[in-house]
Amino acid sequence: MHRIRSYTFVLASVLLLTPCFPVHSADMYKWTDESGGIHFTDSLAKVPEKYREQLERKGYEEAPPPQLEPNDSIPRPRSSAVDTKRDVKHPTKYEVPYTPYEGSAKRVIVTAVFNGSVSAPLAIDTGAPGTVISYGLAKRIGLLDEDQGRLQVAIGGIGGTAPAIRSIIDTVQVGGAKSEFVPTTISAPISNAFDGLLGLDFVANYSMTIDTKRKVVVFEELPNDPELPGGHDRDWWSSLFREFAESRARWKSYSEDLDKRIGASMRSIGNKDIDTKAFAEQQYREADKLFDKLNRYAREHSVPMHWKQY
C-alpha cells in the first residue's frame, strides 16, 4: 500500500491520459417463476424456454458481443451419463440468509468469503455486471501485495471519474455457492454497511432467486455448458483479454513516449520525470500480470483461441 500511495500525485497527472474502465458489462435477464420467485442471469441460454416470453432485459452501453462464425468450434468435454442425470434432475441449491436493509434503504446484503479465509458483507447488485470491493477489504484479502496484479485505472460514474484498481480474486463464496477467478474493481468505500457490490459475474454458474418473504437468496447450480468454458461466454473472455492487453500496450507506449520527450528536451531529468517514468513501467508490469493470469485460466478451461483475440 505504501508503494501505491507514493504514486498518488503521478496518477493524478496521467489520469486524463487513461481511458475510464467501467466494471465489465453485459446484458442481464430477469424472469419470475410460477411461485413468484425472481431470477437473474447474464446468459439467455440459462433461461428456461417456458419463461423466455416474459423476459425483462437490461442492456449496458457497450459494443455488441462478437458472434460465432459458422465454422467456429468449441471443444466439448465428455461427461458421464450419471453426472448429466444428476445435473439436470437434481440441481444443487444453496439458501443464504441476507440482511434486507442498509439503514432505511432496501438491500440484499450477504456474507461473502474471499480466497477461503476473509469474510465481509457485500450487497448483491443485479445492475452491476462486475464485482466491486473497498480498498480496506482488498488489503485484507492481500490484493494490494507486491505479487498481485494491481492495475490503476480511472472509473466513471455520475459524479465524474475517480482512481481505482483492477485486480483478480481467486475465489468468492456465498454460502455453498462459489465462483473462481473473479475480476474485481477496487475503489473507495460505497457504504459503511457493506464492503462492496457482488455483481452478475459471480452468479454465472447459478440461477439466483431472491425470496423476500423468507429473507434468503437461493443459488441453484446450472448444468455444465460446454459452450461456456469456465461458466462464461465469448464476450466475457474477449472483453477481459482486450482490457488487459490494451492496458499493457498503452502503458508501454506511454513509457516509451516519456523516454523520447526526456531525451529530446536536452535537460537533466528531475524527480517528477523519474517518478512518472517509474509509475508507467510499474503499470505495464501490473497489466502484464493480469493478462498472464487470465491466459493461464483460459488454458485451464480450453477457451478457443479466437476468443482471445485482442
Image: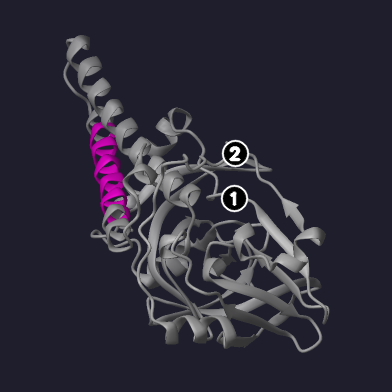
Q: Position of residue 100 (x, y in %)?
A: 74, 79
Q: Which is more toward the observer, 152 or 67?
A: 67
Circle 2 Cα neighbour tier, 10 Å, few/some/many (<14 / 14–19 / ≥20): few
Mark 1 Cα shell of 10 Å, populated few (<14), some (14-19), many (≥20): many
CA–CA distance between discs 1 and 2? Answer: 8 Å
- Residue 58 place in picture, x, y as percent: 72, 51
Give the residue pinned by disc 1.
26
Q: What amino acid is at disc 1?
A: Ala
Q: To which residue does mark 2 refer? A: 62
State whether residue 119 is above or below residue 42.
below
Q: Quadrant of the N terminus?
A: bottom left
Q: Amino acid at mark 2?
A: Glu
Q: Magenta part mainly helix, strand or loop?
A: helix
Say whether residue 290 is magenta: yes
Indicate the quadrant where residue 276 lies: top left
The residue under the point 43% across, 87% down is 82
Span colored in magenta: 276-294
Residue 142's disc number: none
Find numbered disc 2 in the image and state the secondary structure of the residue it sits on.
Answer: loop
